[in-house]
Image: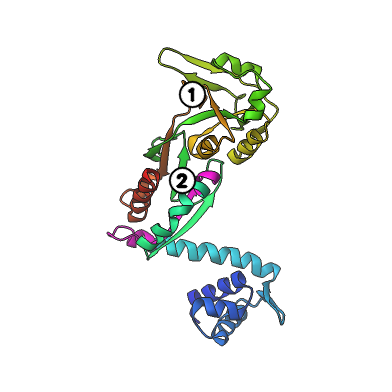
Amino acid sequence: MDKLLALTMFVETVRCGGYSAAARRLGVATSSVARQVAGLEAELGAALLNRTTRQNSPTAVGLGYYEKAVSILDALAEADGAIFDRGSEARGRLRVSMPVEFGRRIIAPHIGRFLAQHPELEVSLSLSDQMTDLLKERIDVSVRLGSSLANDDIISKPVGRFERWVVASPEYLARTRVPTHPHDLLEHQCLCFDYDSAPPNWVLRDDVESFAINVQGRLQSNNAEILREAALSGAGLTLLADWLVAEDVRQGRLTRVLAGYDASPGGASCLINALYLPNHRGSSRIRAFIAFLEDALRR
C-alpha cells in the first residue's frame, strides 16, 4: 500500500465528508478512495470512519489520526515548498496573517489579481487583530500596523504608511464641546482599542510638542470595526486608521477633530510592516507577496 497516497485520500475524505466528494477533489474514482482508506484501516487494525449512506465522519480514533496525518502532509508540503521557494517563480502554499478590517478593505479587493499573477501559488489568509506567533502558528508572513516587532528572530519589512485620525459623529459633537486641544480629550467619552496592556494612552504631536493623554471611556474593543460602528452611533470619539474612516469622513458620517496633530496609541508608529522569519530570506513566495502588498497600498 502507498501510505502517503492513503493518508492523502483519508484526509480529503474527512475534509469533504465522503468518498465521492474527496474523489472529485482529487480527480480519481470513488472506488479508489474507498479502497485506499479501507487498506489504511486494515493495516492499523482500527476503524477510522463512521460510514453512513449520507456521509463519512471520523471516529474518535480517526479524528486523532486525521490531525496527525494533516501535520505530516503539511510538513511534507512545506519541505517541498522550501526547495521550490528558491526559484524565480512563487510556488507552493503561503500562510499569511493580517488585521481583520485591513484584510477585508485593503487586501481583499486585490487578492484575485495576486493569485492570477502567480498560478502556482496557494494562499492561506488568516484575519486576526491579535499578534501572531510566526513559528508556533506556522505563519510565513504577518502584516502588522504600527509596530514592527523587529528583533534578531523576526525580519520586518516596511511596505507602506497610514495615518490615525480622531473622529466622532456629528451627532456626538453637537451635544458636547468639540475638542480643539489634546487636553480636551479628558472631557470626552473615548472609544479605545484594547491592547491587553496599560490603560488607554493617546499621544498627539504638533510641530512644537507632544501630549500623552490618558483617555477615558466606557468601551474598549480588540476589533477596530466595533469602535467605528460605536463612533457612527454617537457613542464617543475614537482613534482609527485613515483607511478605515476616510470614506465616512468624506460622506459626513464622521467628523475628524484635532486634525492639526499626529495621533497614535502610545508610541506606536504609522508604518505597515510585513514580518517573517530569518530562515525565509530569499523566499520567492514572500518576495512576491511583499511586492503585491506595496502595489496594493499604492493603489
Q: Amino acid at mark 2?
A: Ser
Residue at 48% x, 39% y: name it: 243
Q: Which residue is mark 2?
A: 142
Identify the image quadrant of residue 224.
Answer: top right
Q: Residues within 10 Å of mark 1 (few under 14, many from 20)?
A: few
Q: In this picture, is 213 found above or below 30?
A: above
Q: Nearer the viewer, residue 295 or 64?
A: 295
Task: Please rate how many residues cluster around mark 2, counting C-alpha atoms within 10 Å: few if below 14, some from 14 to 19, many from 20.
Answer: many
- The answer to whether 296 is drawn above or below residue 50 in the figure is above
In the rendered view, tell whether residue 63 sits above or below residue 194. Answer: below
Q: Residue furthest left?
A: 88
Q: Position of residue 76 (x, y in %)?
A: 44, 64
Q: Is residue 110 visible?
A: yes
Which residue, as the protein is rendered here, is positioned at the far right?
52
Which region shows up in magenta?
81-103
In percent of width and height, residue 208 lies at 41, 12
Tell me the residue that label 1 is attached to: 259
| SS category of the residue bearing label 1 | loop
- Label ID, residue 179: none
Residue 86 on the magenta segment? yes
Q: Is residue 211 left or right of residue 218?
A: left
Instruction: Give SS at disc 2.
Output: strand
Q: Position of residue 7 (x, y in %)?
A: 53, 73
The amino acid sitting under disc 1 is: Ala
Q: Nearer the viewer, residue 196 or 41?
A: 196
